[in-house]
Image (cartoon, rainbow, N blue to C red):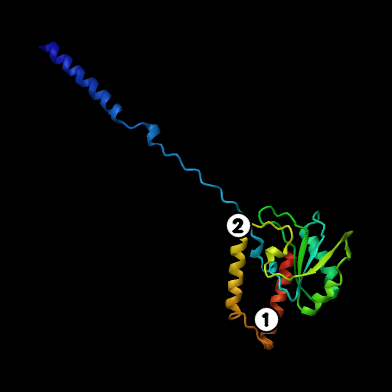
């Protein structure tokens, strides 16, 4: 009888010691593996820059640029070369959105529409040993205007948003025949700020 009780108690002790470990969840099952998140590709779409949008009545496209030069040097050289034709609003040197590589052209925007006509006369001129091709901006889409430009997934949406904002700002595209003096002064201030920002970039 004593042996039987001893065996029972021994069996109970073994079960008591083994039961918790058997019911205990596996550490590997409890471990939570973090899901790998796709790395977001960070880049800036060129159409987030307002200078990328050309206006057909006062913008020209210059082709045949030396892509080995820095953007700042190209911009400065173009201002000197085309500055004699009139007051330049901006010089935009487009690059591929994702890679930042130059595509060999630049968009020059003049303040006066007549200055753009003078700049067209420089077609075939040389800049730094490179012969330039100068054409007028005759297309409404800047992405189609830049030759050999691939762009990114945000290009179309960014352009649409810009055009929508411009449509709202100009009240449906209606333009004033003669802007008042306070608007002209505001334009002059905006022009100065744009040129200064371009120099710093």
Quarter of the image where one finds residue 106: bottom right
Q: Which residue is mark 1?
A: 186
Quarter occupied by the C terminus: bottom right
Marks 2 and 1 in Cβ contact (< 8 Å) = no
Q: Nearer the viewer, residue 36 or 7?
A: 36
Per the rendering, the mark at residue 119 is none
Please tell me whether mark 2 or mark 1 is closer to you in this view. Answer: 2
Quarter occupied by the N terminus: top left
Q: Nearer the viewer, residue 45 or 20?
A: 45
Disc 2 packing (10 Å; few <14; some 14–19; many ≥20): few
Q: Nearer the viewer, residue 153 or 31?
A: 153
Query: Where residue 19 sits in the image (x, y, percent)?
Result: 26, 26
Q: Which residue is mark 2?
A: 153
Query: Where residue 11 sits in the image (x, y, percent)?
Result: 20, 18
Quarter of the image where one finds residue 43: bottom right
Give the CA separation, mark 2 to mark 1: 34 Å
Give whichever of discs 2 and 1 has the lower sequence position: 2
């Amino acid at each position: 009888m004593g042996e039987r009780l001893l065996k029972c108690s021994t069996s109970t002790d073994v079960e008591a010691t083994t039961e918790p470990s058997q019911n205990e969840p596996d550490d590997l099952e409890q471990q939570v593996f973090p899901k790998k998140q796709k790395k977001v590709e960070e880049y800036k779409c060129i159409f987030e820059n307002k200078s990328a949008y050309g206006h057909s009545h006062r913008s020209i496209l210059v082709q045949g640029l030396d892509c080995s030069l820095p953007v700042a040097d190209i911009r400065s050289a173009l201002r000197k070369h085309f500055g004699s034709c009139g007051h330049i609003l901006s010089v935009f040197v487009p690059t591929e959105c994702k890679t930042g590589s130059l595509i060999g052209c630049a968009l020059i925007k003049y303040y006066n529409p007549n200055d753009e006509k003078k700049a067209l006369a420089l077609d075939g001129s040389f800049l730094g040993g490179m012969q330039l091709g100068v054409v007028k901006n005759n297309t409404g889409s800047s992405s189609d205007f830049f030759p050999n430009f691939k762009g990114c997934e945000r290009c179309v949406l960014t352009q649409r948003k810009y055009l929508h904002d411009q449509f709202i700002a100009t009240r449906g595209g209606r333009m004033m025949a003669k802007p008042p003096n306070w608007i002209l002064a505001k334009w002059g201030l905006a022009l100065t700020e744009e040129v200064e920002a371009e120099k710093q970039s």
